[in-house]
Image: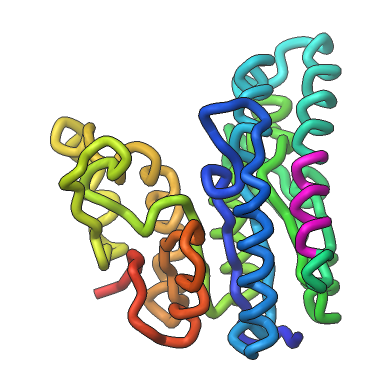
Amino acid sequence: MTTEDLIVLKLGGSLLTDKSTAYKLREEVIKAVAAEIKECIDLGLIKSLVIVHGVGSCGHHPVLKYNLHKGFRNKDQLISMSKTQQIVNVFRKTIATTFLEEGIPINLMHASSMVVGSKMVITDYTFNSLKGFLSLGMVPLIGGDMMYDTSMGFSVCGGDQLAVILSRVAHAKQLIFATDVPGVFDKDPKLEAHAQMLREININEIEQMFAKPNETANTDASGKMRGKLLSLVSIKDKIQEDLEVVILSMNKKGVLKNYLKGQESELTKIIYN
């Protein structure tokens, strides 16, 4: 693998875990995702890759249980944070092991060692090590984590935010969000049978989509996709230049491969016009 044509691939927590059940992994999905990525590498469709993963039910459950999302309050929380990190690390190791079994040279890395935030927003980072291993041909695997926060003591560092920053810092050609749904819908497709998928979303209109909460309160975009879409505003300039950003599903085999081949795929593309 080379550092040319870098792809930052964000694997959503809802894709890799069952968010309705604490600590439940979707192991068959993880295996299928790893197999398709390896196939894409072998076909030359992926030349350089960074994988960012969400933590899903392995992270959200203990974070809420121990109120870690509210930041550092007292030293009694430190053991709880350590327990949460260990739970998530078991999940990370499962992902890394599955990818390694497919023959992918995974390098497991931790965001808490690379980023600093303020009020849950990454404000400082050093990705030199990650970029170095990437240049050797390894596939860095990094995911949602707890980060040191200059305002809150510690805070949640989400995978979407990591993926967006990495796409800028590492000069990615493509930023792909792989979720458990085919793209962004006007309504939650899991609740509304007649939900319509948006094939394209103009980055210049994303902020306006959420300016009138009464009109968008029931949409999938304003709920589960809200943070993901709003995080993209910070790389509007990169999208204007040449960064390709898409949201697709890897629940179904072949969607990623077909997209990378340039074939028609069911997905949502973020455009600039």
Residue 152: quarter of image: top right
Coloring basis for residues: rainbow
* Residue 183, x across and y down, in percent: 35, 58
Magenta-colored segment: predominant secondary structure: helix
Residue at 60% x, 41% y: name it: 17
Residue in view at x 82 percent, y 24 percent? 83
Q: Pick out the residue farthest to the front.
A: 28
Left or right: 167 as drawn, with respect to 185: right
Count numbered badges in the picture.
0
Is residue 15 toward the left or the right of residue 31 in the image? left
Spot occupied by residue 272 in the image (x, y as percentages of width and height)? 30, 73
Asked which quadrant contains residue 142, the reply is: bottom right
Where residue 258 sits, quadrant-wise, is bottom left
Q: Which residue occupies the foreground of this view, 171 or 51?
A: 51
Q: Quadrant of the N terminus?
A: bottom right
Viewer-proximal residue among 70 and 153 = 70
Magenta span contains residue 212: no
Vertical order, 202 against 150 (above or below): below
The C terminus appears in which quarter of the rendering?
bottom left
Question: Which residues, given as a range, are shown in magenta?
Answer: 90-99
210 left or right of 69 in image: left
Where residue 259 sits in the image (x, y, percent)?
Answer: 44, 78
Residue 79, compared with residue 119, is above or below; it is above
Pick the front one: 97 or 135: 97
Q: Residue at x 71, y 29 (%)?
A: 154
Query: Which residue shows up at 75% across the image and 48% down it?
Result: 111
